[in-house]
Amino acid sequence: MRIGLIGYGYWGPNILRNLVAHTDAEVAIVADQKLERLAALKKVYPAVRTTTDANEVTEAKDIDAVIVATPVQTHYSLARAALLSGKHVLVEKPLADSLKGAEELVALAAEKKLMLMIDHTYLYTGAVEVMKRVIDSGEIGVLQSFSSTRFNLGLFQGDVNVLWDLAPHDLSILLHLIGRMPTLVNAVGVSHTGNNIENIAYLTLRYDDGMIAHIGASWVSPVKIRQMLISGDKKMIVFDDTEAIEKVKIYESGYTVRTDEDKRRLYMDYRSGDIHIPNVGNKEALQGVVEDFIHAVSKGSTPRSDAHFGLNVVRVLDAAERSLREGGAEVRLS
Amino acid sequence: MRIGLIGYGYWGPNILRNLVAHTDAEVAIVADQKLERLAALKKVYPAVRTTTDANEVTEAKDIDAVIVATPVQTHYSLARAALLSGKHVLVEKPLADSLKGAEELVALAAEKKLMLMIDHTYLYTGAVEVMKRVIDSGEIGVLQSFSSTRFNLGLFQGDVNVLWDLAPHDLSILLHLIGRMPTLVNAVGVSHTGNNIENIAYLTLRYDDGMIAHIGASWVSPVKIRQMLISGDKKMIVFDDTEAIEKVKIYESGYTVRTDEDKRRLYMDYRSGDIHIPNVGNKEALQGVVEDFIHAVSKGSTPRSDAHFGLNVVRVLDAAERSLREGGAEVRLS
Amino acid sequence: MRIGLIGYGYWGPNILRNLVAHTDAEVAIVADQKLERLAALKKVYPAVRTTTDANEVTEAKDIDAVIVATPVQTHYSLARAALLSGKHVLVEKPLADSLKGAEELVALAAEKKLMLMIDHTYLYTGAVEVMKRVIDSGEIGVLQSFSSTRFNLGLFQGDVNVLWDLAPHDLSILLHLIGRMPTLVNAVGVSHTGNNIENIAYLTLRYDDGMIAHIGASWVSPVKIRQMLISGDKKMIVFDDTEAIEKVKIYESGYTVRTDEDKRRLYMDYRSGDIHIPNVGNKEALQGVVEDFIHAVSKGSTPRSDAHFGLNVVRVLDAAERSLREGGAEVRLS
Amino acid sequence: MRIGLIGYGYWGPNILRNLVAHTDAEVAIVADQKLERLAALKKVYPAVRTTTDANEVTEAKDIDAVIVATPVQTHYSLARAALLSGKHVLVEKPLADSLKGAEELVALAAEKKLMLMIDHTYLYTGAVEVMKRVIDSGEIGVLQSFSSTRFNLGLFQGDVNVLWDLAPHDLSILLHLIGRMPTLVNAVGVSHTGNNIENIAYLTLRYDDGMIAHIGASWVSPVKIRQMLISGDKKMIVFDDTEAIEKVKIYESGYTVRTDEDKRRLYMDYRSGDIHIPNVGNKEALQGVVEDFIHAVSKGSTPRSDAHFGLNVVRVLDAAERSLREGGAEVRLS
């Protein structure tokens, strides 16, 4: 399988390194607008063709698939061009910067019978894999809440706000773990840069069954926080991605609600038991992404973050955007 | 100064212990509905009168002041009775369980020329005192964001939701540090107990100048979190109340926004410098509350958390309640 | 059972509180040299007799047992007087400040058929109880190493060095968990106070089977450290007593040694698996001490830290003292 | 300046990467016994000559300097060969596996007027640079104690024990920060692998002025510990190398000793103040090593870890070895 890569900035070199390490893949061509990046690439991988023109990649005759690792606002047009040119596509998260664009891409891929996969890298981390197993086993019980904080200082984006930039990580984990969409979306945020691009925002999702999910996203924090709390009615999980070893902790903690006979007063029994820290290994997640994509293209399997999955993430982001514009009012997802 | 205390449950014994240690105060009478609590009190403080009837306290002839340490829904009626009976009042936070009730109490105290103070204990902690000094010094710069998480497992309240129960802590710190009220309030939450009393809720406050404050409150969390992040445009603060020593950290971190000549593109310069951890001491905060109350009553000074301060906290809670009922829509504070 | 207490300084009030809470015990008399301490005691427990003369306690006719909670150098004479006067004795750790004294006390108690117990409080903590269970179950495998660090700033003692002051905690845990005595003892230390009383010292114990134990003790540290690492050939334990919740962690980590055919080269297989954090509860350890003592006296049972156990701790301390005086040379325990 | 590198295992590739990035250095030839390592090298750096014969490097005519990045027991012979062949030498720590060998190398380099530098990488970390500045400023006061723990699971060495393997890190930091040699050395350890190579060992160094240093080294620990506590009589330092950001903390903590008039009793005043966390940056330490070596060779400057510095580290290790063989007895350094 021969692959073309568009974008050799922050994430592109990591993708290339993982492609090169994969026995069934060959990288034929890489595009980036900056010549110095292409020169750096040439030093290490002299056999790879380079270009500053993304069209050369999407239209290359000798490749089967295109990987799009460029800024968000270009995802739609580049993925569209690649699909139109008959290539399978792996695109960075989020799939597109608008719901309309994302829907078009999904429809186009279906029509052309081409693979369209989104690089929601977190789904391939040992931590998320362990949490998925634990939740699917029923050990956690009925899920009641999900609270994620993704704060850091820096890397303000110029084209999309902090929710479009950071929340796809949390949303992809949430949707993967829970397996279903919320009903109501609220988002509130603020821009401190005078360009109406929110740099701090809070997103709340409510499900019909009482499940609530909350995501705090900020480019302006004194400390880096990557913490996720997940509560079921039997056990609870903490995922702290800033920890080197103890990333996932499973708490035998919870509460049981009792009522007295006339059901007027509630009594709570709290329990707090052992904590278990599963070994999540240290496989590079991006390796899993690349393997899943190559396998999906070559074998026709469905990748973990396929086009519909990526579209659902954009659906929530689109609803969040509308709520932001309406001062945080709830937006109902159809 | 002679004092009566109503409520000897969780917080009452701590108040009593601090009153007893104060040279200018004498506790004459204590009321609680549970006889076993009064018996326990008698063992340690045999000279204190006890009663199961709160009216005996509010109407006692030999006391100057009443301290109300009872569940929230009783604050209004007990504080009102004490004020009507000519007593100065220190009431647990929040001042009352409704805006109307809180306003009435404030008006009544003013009319009667009696001290009405609210026990916002956090304002008397070394940590908040240090943060107040640092912020007032201008060292932090223009405040841009405040994000507080107050999560734990347990102590579900039966009469008020998690915002009325926990957020007064964060709101009192916020209002004390910032010194002004927000304009817009959003709140979203969920009840998992079938009684419409939210056990998880998220509160967002926006100020006219772009400052944003966010408070997450939960009775359902695998871990106890008491973390507050405050960002100014010069420095940033983290206050972690679960830390024994390193409670307050001041980060010489921040960013500066530059634009290019045609102001179309923003550039960010990030800086990340030293961290300073001021010694916050280990004085018991409640001792400061008691001293401030006694001083205010005897000297006519204004306590840190006076009636108007406590009313402002209730104003925000009332707006949050209205937003909760409207699905998280923004509520404008007048 | 009626009890007399000698010493109402730092630890005495905790002992008294736990005695008062015990249904089968009554505290008849308390001695302390400082009148203000006795006055404070009288306020809370008016029915207890007080005295500044320890002899009044050891000779009191109306008591069955004496608890000695005084500085180390007085343990021997007070415990001796109490035993001679026919009282059962619970003495603070270490049993005595010399091996000779400790041996005398043990012999005297045996001769008089009186209970002599040492308050090695740590043995009654949930953390040590859990570790004991885990080790006894065989889960950890053959124990290979024990490394404990007990550092803090302050509380320099004037009569005994830092090993006699702090190491009894670690030694009691070690001897309780391992159940046997080391063969070789080395100790090195330093005094910074010009009085030849070491304020920093390191103690190493070696067992015949290759087990090594190390204890670092310091009154001069910027941070408080209470960390113990225990390695078996199957699993490993970390006990961090400064943690509020995660005190004991059990690591499924270890290594296996392989050799090649001619046994000339060693190969190591390392494994690193899950971590388990047992809930250690939050029972007050001193309550267990008091219960064990009262039970032992009234029922004739053997308490966890009986006279022989306490003597073994002193044996190691005595050997350590000799090694300290010989520049750290190894001292063989008989 | 043209350089040859011997050893392309764990550390060699890092050295090569830093050499390649240096504008004044060119790597001509690399030797390693494993062909697959050389093949991997060739892929990335096709222009570099490779060989399995280390002699080809030491005798290469076109190079000025040799870097030795091989196991400890080969340092002496390789460095000697390189010096005899007229090359400047940078050798991995420790300089040699025997005091005699180290002394010979130092003498040989002096005789040949060649640079002999040891790669004590830690000296070039931001953390050590900051601590050096702070200590040299006098802010810490008179140094009293240094306590370092270097524990981890794994990487048992087959040729040298855990002290020769790990303690050079701590010793180099200690000697660099303190600037003088200890007088007395004690070491105790144990081997669990049946080959008399200690895998856990404790090293204590005492200075004439009362300063004490302690180093715990272990290949058998459930957790990775890289913690160093340094106490002066004015302030104290904690260096925790497992921390990503807060590596160095300076504590305004300490104590003052007072005596009463007849000097019979000591009184201690403890103080505990603010904590300061200097930003230590994130420059790669090895880059500093390479720059210092190239600068020293080309300009004749004295590198931070020159031959005499490296020899002092070996002197302490040699004394430690002798103490280990004598059951931990003190060994006096001449």
Image (cartoon, coloured by chain):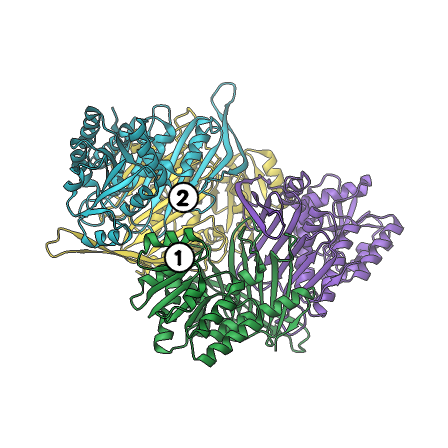
Chain colours: A yellow, B cyan, C green, D purple
Along the viewing direction, whichever of A109 and B30 lies nearer the viewer: B30
Q: Which residue is mark 2?
A: B241
Q: Please give left or right for residue A198 compared with residue D24 in the image.
A: left
Alpha carbon separation for disc pair 1 and 2 = 29 Å
> Circle 1 marks a residue in which chain?
C
Q: Is residue A318 visible?
A: no
Label 1, residues with CA under 10 Å away: few <14, some 14-19, many ≥20:
some
Quadrant of residue B64 in the image?
A: top left
Element marked by disc 2: loop
Q: Give residue D216's position: percent from left, percent from top.
A: 62, 60
Which numbered marker is on residue C13? Answer: 1
The answer to whether marks 1 and 2 sit on the same chain is no
- The quadrant of the image that shows the C terminus of chain B is top left
Along the viewing direction, whichever of D26 and D285 lies nearer the viewer: D285
Q: Give residue A87's position: percent from left, percent from top.
A: 44, 44
Dot 2 amino acid type: Asp
The residue mark sitting in front, 1 or 2, is: 1
Q: Give residue D292's position: percent from left, percent from top.
A: 74, 43
